[in-house]
Image (cartoon, rainbow, N blue to C red):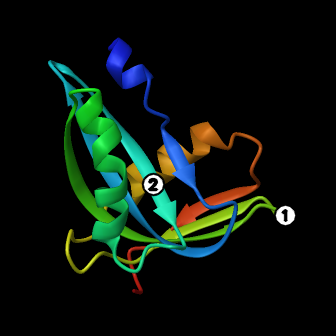
């Protein structure tokens, strides 16, 4: 991994509720990684990408939003459900997203996805 990529958290999402999320692919030379970002305050998926771009540019990382969807997060019951798509970016590969979330929340009882729904 690269030092620049290591400076970017893998996951930054709301602690609870239902919200839009995006999956972003970062590149630094031959090194790459995916990150998940999701916020209730975002009216559109593009708003999330616009919010994180300054940090990525500051680190001189190439980024591409590879899709989006929605997340239902219940920290009390330790459950995450990923589904849906972004009108602007298309549907994220929810299997990549849930893999990242499983590493970030190893104690959670349920982290699942569906390719159905909006």
Quarter containing the N terminus: top left
Q: Which residue lies furthest to the right in this view?
A: 76
Residue that mark 2 sits on: 37
Can you tell which quarter of the image residue 91 is in?
bottom left
Element on which disc 2 rests: strand
Q: Which residue is drawn at 71% across and 63% down?
A: 79
Task: Name which of mark 1 and mark 2 comes first in the sequence.
Answer: 2
Q: Would you call the spot at circle 2 few (<14 residues within 10 Å), some (14-19), or many (20 or more)? A: many
Residue 84 tag number: none
Q: Which residue lies furthest to the bottom in this view?
A: 117
Residue 93 showing in the rendered view = no
Query: Does 49 sit above or below residue 29?
Result: below
Q: Which residue is drawn at 43% across and 31% down?
A: 8
Residue that mark 1 sits on: 76
Q: Is residue 101 left or right of residue 97?
A: right
CA distance for labels 1 and 2:
20 Å
Query: Does 106 sit above or below residue 115?
Result: above
User: Residue 97 location in percent, x, y?
Assistant: 44, 52
Can you tell which quarter of the image residue 25 is in?
top left
Query: Does 118 sit above or below residue 24?
Result: below
User: Residue 9 location in percent, x, y?
Assistant: 49, 35
Q: Is residue 109 left or right of residue 35?
A: right
Q: Would you call the spot at circle 1 few (<14 residues within 10 Å), some (14-19), or many (20 or more)? A: few
User: Residue 6 location in percent, x, y?
Assistant: 43, 21
Element on which disc 1 rests: loop
Residue 72 showing in the rendered view = yes
**Mark toward the viewer: 1 or 2:** 2
Tell me whether the residue at label 1 lies in contact with that at label 2, contact meaning CB atoms closer than 8 angstroms.
no
Q: Nearer the viewer, residue 15 or 41?
A: 41
Can you tell which quarter of the image residue 15 is in?
bottom right
């Amino acid at each position: 991994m690269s030092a620049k990529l290591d400076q970017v958290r893998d996951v930054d999402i709301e602690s609870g509720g239902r919200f839009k999320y995006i999956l972003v692919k970062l590149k630094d030379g031959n090194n790459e990684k995916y990150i998940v970002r999701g916020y209730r305050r975002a009216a559109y998926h593009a708003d999330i990408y616009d919010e994180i771009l300054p940090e990525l540019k500051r680190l001189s990382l190439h980024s591409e939003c590879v899709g989006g969807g929605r997340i239902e997060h219940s920290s009390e019951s330790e459950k995450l459900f990923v589904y849906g798509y972004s009108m602007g970016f298309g549907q994220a590969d929810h299997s990549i997203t849930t893999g990242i979330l499983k590493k970030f929340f190893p104690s959670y009882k349920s982290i699942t996805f569906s390719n159905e729904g909006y």
